[in-house]
Image (spheres, rainbow, N blue to C red):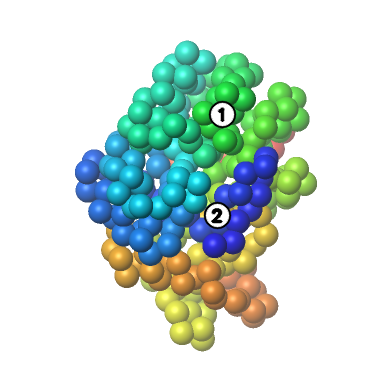
């Protein structure tokens, strides 16, 4: 599995997402994913499946050093004391002694960014989190975190798929040597039935969904965490690692609309903010 090294930590480029896999039902799904070869497992306190993910990790028989586990703190737990309590709870549920990547799941309008990032950084300094990062930050928030606060951000996780441009964010991250982790890479299932992606897939003997994932993996500094409940889909997503797009494919995908954002909770930041 190809990795991206960030802040001294090697993160597998293709991970396994577990959003909307609540409770014990997640355990056999994650066990199967690990058995197939996934080593980057992405969960969150809000998903309510950390205990099941932890049980799957324990049952896998795979050495802890080979696994890369990401979890996240919810946006109502960003005060330093609350963040530390949330981290301890996640660690306990996962049954681990450290997390590989601990992320702020969403920014909060009333967060004290400096103290929140200081609390995150302290987890890293104590060896409890090997790396830290943020999800769903807009560019002004990211600039403040990276340039003003100098937080050791290792990854930025955002919605990214063939219908949403992240060119401004990607440009910024590449200038600072930071990877982008793409969630909802299939646009919540829409990419699987896209005729343009299907036509490209037919050329390569693969599915439209595999082309969407391959398009993300084709971009330097991008990691991808598709969710897949069925073993066949888990295998297909892994197989996307071997797809090689050509310039004609890239041009066809570039021509798709790039202004469609499907994850828009009421507490989301202002996405178009640039200053």
x%, y% of residue 219? 64, 62
What is the quadrant of the C terminus in the image? top right
Q: Quick check: 180 above or below 269?
A: below
Q: Nearer the viewer, residue 34 or 77?
A: 34
**Residue beneath disc 1:** 127
Q: Is residue 226 visible?
A: no
In the rendered view, does 269 fall on the left or right side of 47?
Answer: right
Please identify the quarter of the rendering in which residue 158 is found: top right
What is the quadrant of the N terminus in the image? bottom right
Report the disc number at residue 12: 2
Which residue occupies 41% across, 23% down?
Answer: 88
Q: Quick check: 111 above or below 194?
A: above
Q: Nearer the viewer, residue 86 or 108?
A: 86
Please identify the quarter of the rendering in which residue 270 is found: top right
Which residue occupies 62% across, 44% down?
Answer: 9
Mark 2–mark 1 distance (CA, rounded to whole Å): 20 Å
x%, y% of residue 131? 59, 36
Q: Quick check: 109 above or below 146?
A: above
Q: Nearer the viewer, residue 115 or 27?
A: 27
Secondary structure under the numbered disc 1 in the rendered image: loop
* Residue found at the very far top of the displayed protein: 81
Please identify the quarter of the rendering in which residue 132 is found: top right
In the rendered view, does 122 fall on the left or right side of 238?
Answer: right
Q: Nearer the viewer, residue 45 or 264?
A: 45
Q: Disc 2 vs disc 1: which is toward the camera?
A: 1
Secondary structure under the numbered disc 2 in the rendered image: strand
């Amino acid at each position: 599995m190809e990795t991206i090294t960030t802040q001294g930590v090697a993160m597998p480029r293709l991970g396994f997402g577990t959003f909307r896999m609540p409770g014990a039902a997640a355990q056999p799904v994650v066990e199967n994913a690990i058995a197939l070869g996934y080593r980057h497992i992405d969960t969150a306190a809000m998903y309510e499946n950390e205990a099941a993910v932890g049980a799957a990790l324990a049952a896998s028989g795979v050495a802890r050093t080979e696994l890369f586990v990401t979890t996240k703190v919810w946006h109502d737990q960003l005060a330093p004391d609350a963040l530390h309590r949330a981290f301890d709870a996640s660690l306990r549920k996962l049954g681990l002694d450290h997390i590989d990547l601990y992320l702020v799941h969403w920014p909060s309008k009333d967060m004290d960014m400096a103290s929140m990032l200081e609390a995150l950084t302290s987890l890293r300094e104590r060896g409890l989190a090997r790396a830290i990062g943020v999800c769903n930050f807009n560019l002004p928030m990211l600039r403040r975190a990276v340039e003003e606060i100098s937080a050791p951000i290792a990854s930025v996780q955002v919605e990214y798929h063939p219908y949403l441009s992240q060119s401004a964010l990607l440009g910024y991250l590449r200038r600072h040597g930071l990877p982008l982790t793409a969630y909802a890479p299939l646009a919540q299932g829409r990419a699987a039935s896209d005729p343009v992606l299907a036509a490209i897939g037919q050329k390569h003997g693969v599915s439209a969904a595999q082309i969407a994932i391959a398009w993300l993996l084709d971009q330097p500094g991008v990691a991808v965490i598709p969710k897949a409940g069925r073993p066949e889909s888990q295998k297909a997503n892994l197989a996307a690692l071997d797809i090689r797009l050509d310039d004609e494919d890239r041009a066809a995908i570039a021509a798709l609309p790039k202004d469609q954002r499907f994850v828009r909770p009421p507490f989301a930041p202002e996405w178009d903010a640039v200053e």
